[in-house]
């Protein structure tokens, strides 16, 4: 199967098809990524300790750190330094496109 998107618009690692559905599943298809995004986008938790404490599902700190790094690297979240020197994560412009249109992404 040929890559459905030009290589210059969407870099695809060697050995991958470039199928948008497959790439999305590879990025978000694990047990925790969507839960982390949910807690940031809809729960209002943007800092590591808030996400850890508010996790009803009980995510481990090492898993949370890994998923946050993965989502930032993918461009779905961006780091946001606030005046209190706490580093939060908010949906990036790319990630905000997946939110309902009436939602304020900075609250």
Image (spheres, helix red, strand yellow):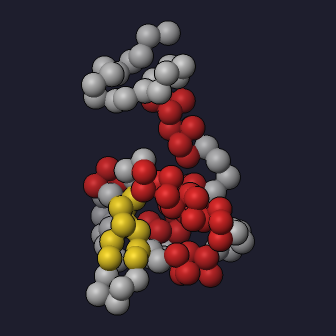
**Residue drawn 37% across the image and 29% down it:** 11
Q: Is residue 20 above or below residue 102?
A: above
Quarter of the rendering containing residue 10: top left
Residue 99 visible, this angle? no
**Residue drawn 63% across the image and 57% down it:** 32
Please state the horizontal and vertical placement of residue 15, each as a whole percent of the image: 54, 19
Please state the horizontal and vertical placement of residue 21, each as a whole percent of the image: 50, 30
Q: Residue furthest top?
A: 1
- Which residue occupies the foreground of this view, 41 or 60? 60
Quarter of the rendering containing residue 41: bottom left
Number of numbered discs visible in the structure rendering: 0
Classify the position of the C terminus by image quarter. bottom left
Residue 41 visible, this angle? yes
Please state the horizontal and vertical placement of residue 89, each as a whole percent of the image: 41, 68
In the drawing, does residue 51 fall left or right of residue 60? left
**Residue drawn 60% across the image and 65% down it:** 64
Q: Is residue 13 above or below residue 70?
A: above
- Which residue occupies the foreground of this view, 52 or 11? 11
Q: Is residue 80 above or below residue 63?
A: below
Please state the horizontal and vertical placement of residue 86, each as a whole percent of the image: 40, 83
In the drawing, does residue 26 fall left or right of residue 45? right
**Residue drawn 41% across the image and 74% down it:** 88
Q: Residue furthest bottom?
A: 84
């Amino acid at each position: 199967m040929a890559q459905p998107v030009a290589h210059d618009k969407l870099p695809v690692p060697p050995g991958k098809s470039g199928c948008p559905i497959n790439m999305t599943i590879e990025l978000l298809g694990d047990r925790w990524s969507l839960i982390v995004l949910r807690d940031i986008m809809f729960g209002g938790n943007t800092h590591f300790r808030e996400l850890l404490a508010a996790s009803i599902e009980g995510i481990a700190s090492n898993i949370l750190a890994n998923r946050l790094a993965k989502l930032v690297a993918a461009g779905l979240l961006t780091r946001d330094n606030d005046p209190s020197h706490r580093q939060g994560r908010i949906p990036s412009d790319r990630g905000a496109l997946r939110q309902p249109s009436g939602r304020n992404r900075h609250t």
